Image (cartoon, grey):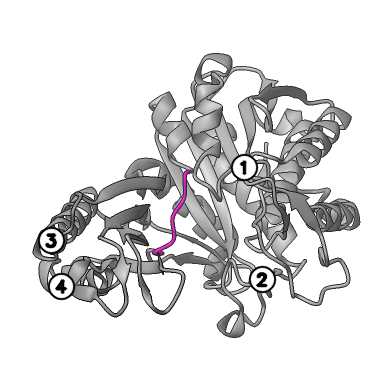
Amino acid sequence: MTIQNILSDLAASRQTREALYQDFHRHPELSLQEYRTAERIEAELRSYGIEVLRIGKTGVVGVINNGPGPVVAMRGDIDALPMAEQSGKDYAATGVTQLDEATGQQTPVAHTCGHDVHIVCLLGAAKALQDHRQDWSGTFLAVFQPGEENAAGAQAMVDAGIVDKLPKPDVYLGQHVLGTLPGGAVGIRSGALFSAAASVEITLYGKGSHGSMPNLGVDPIVLGAAIVTRLQTIVAREVAPRETAVVTVGSFHAGSKSNIIPDSAVLQLNTRAFDKAVEAHLHEAIERIVRAECEAARSPRPPQFRYYDRYPLTHNHAEPTARVRAAFDAYFGEDSVEMAPVPASEDFSIIPDAFGCPYSYWGLGGFADWKQAPGNHSPFFAPDLQPTLDRGVEAIIVAASPWLIGGVQ
């Protein structure tokens, strides 16, 4: 039983996988609205002879039971972003829009984070395992997860009963295509990999008045400006220099006319941290500062806080990550690298945490000219087809090999 046997059809299937990728790329769909995407994934899995389960509205799991042995789950996220693509590729999703069910608005959509790469790599790995069952033993779960971009998809699959419908994995794996690694490289690390994140909407209350009579009102714009400035001291003066933390004010809305003092203002913040205690401190400090500034400004009502788009810390477990890294080193050689922590965020860990199983997650370099590559969520983000699609399939098989075939052979 060898990795080479399982991957022996990689060259023969390359053109088919590239065409499949381009189809997914041309048909992006919003988070938790991935209806066509889920149907196409199901159709592909069934065409391979793989058992398919629908978990929730758009979550899909392919199940390959192949005798006794460990259970390995591999996650691929499937949603796109509400933005227009500007990659210039001949298969770009130019002009594609979708009705956002949450807002009722038509919005542009594009696979500008690379989730289409994740779909096709996981489909390719599942087919390779299905076609070469004699070369491994155990159970492989191909988990196609919706709604990563709005931090709701993993929890939706948990709420839909994924833990009760599938065997408990011995390990839960994941990968993400990035522009921050050399093209074709795989990068992994033990410990904190992606930051915890949350968005916070803060409503400030003032007292409306005519602009010529500010003494009769409480100006929430001045109040908000003071808060924005003071929030900058959290990272600068309250977080230890050895820690990493981000507090960003990304939106400030108030007022309608130059000579009207409004009666409210709304701030939207985003926080990032690689430690749960640091994240808790950020949120405590934000609320403390906002409440104190409101009191100082004579705000007539306490501020309101709404937390949303909350992402957990992605913290790779040491033992499975060491096994995956050893397999990567043996198979990929110099293309297996140590990945630095990334201050982006993921809902990946929600499902393995629900199962109570360890997990390991790695990055996949998607651009030959990686030092000039656009970042994820850029309108120009469109990874090189190759070696990215091949390497993504290889990485999944190699990462699963310590459990399914006992390592690189």
Residue 120 is left or right of residue 234, and the answer is: right
First-in-chain label (4 vs 1): 1
Q: Of residues 348 and 168, which is closer to you in this image?
A: 348
**Does the image show residue 406?**
no
Instruction: Give the mark, 4 or 3, whose residue is nearer the N terminus.
Output: 4
Q: Is residue 127 visible?
A: yes
Residue 108 picture quarter: bottom right
Callout 1 secondary element: loop
Judged from the image, the secondary structure of the residue bearing numbered disc 4 is: loop
Q: Which stretch appears magenta? A: 342-347
Please state which amino acid type lies under the numbered disc 4: Pro
Q: Which residue is mark 3?
A: 298
* Disc 3/disc 1 C-alpha distance (Å): 36 Å
Residue linked to disc 2: 381
Sequence-wise first label, 4 or 2: 4
Mark 4 lies on residue = 241
Label 1 sits on residue: 102
Q: CA distance from mark 2 to mark 1?
A: 26 Å
Q: Is label 2 in contact with label 3 (beta carbons under 8 Å)?
A: no
* Callout 4 touching callout 1 (CB < 8 Å): no
Residue situated in front as seen by the camera: 35 or 407:
35
Real-space Cα separation, disc 4 to disc 1, in angstroms: 40 Å
In percent of width and height, residue 337 lies at 47, 67
Question: Disc 3 marks which amino acid?
Answer: Arg
> Mark 2 or mark 3, which is nearer to you?
3
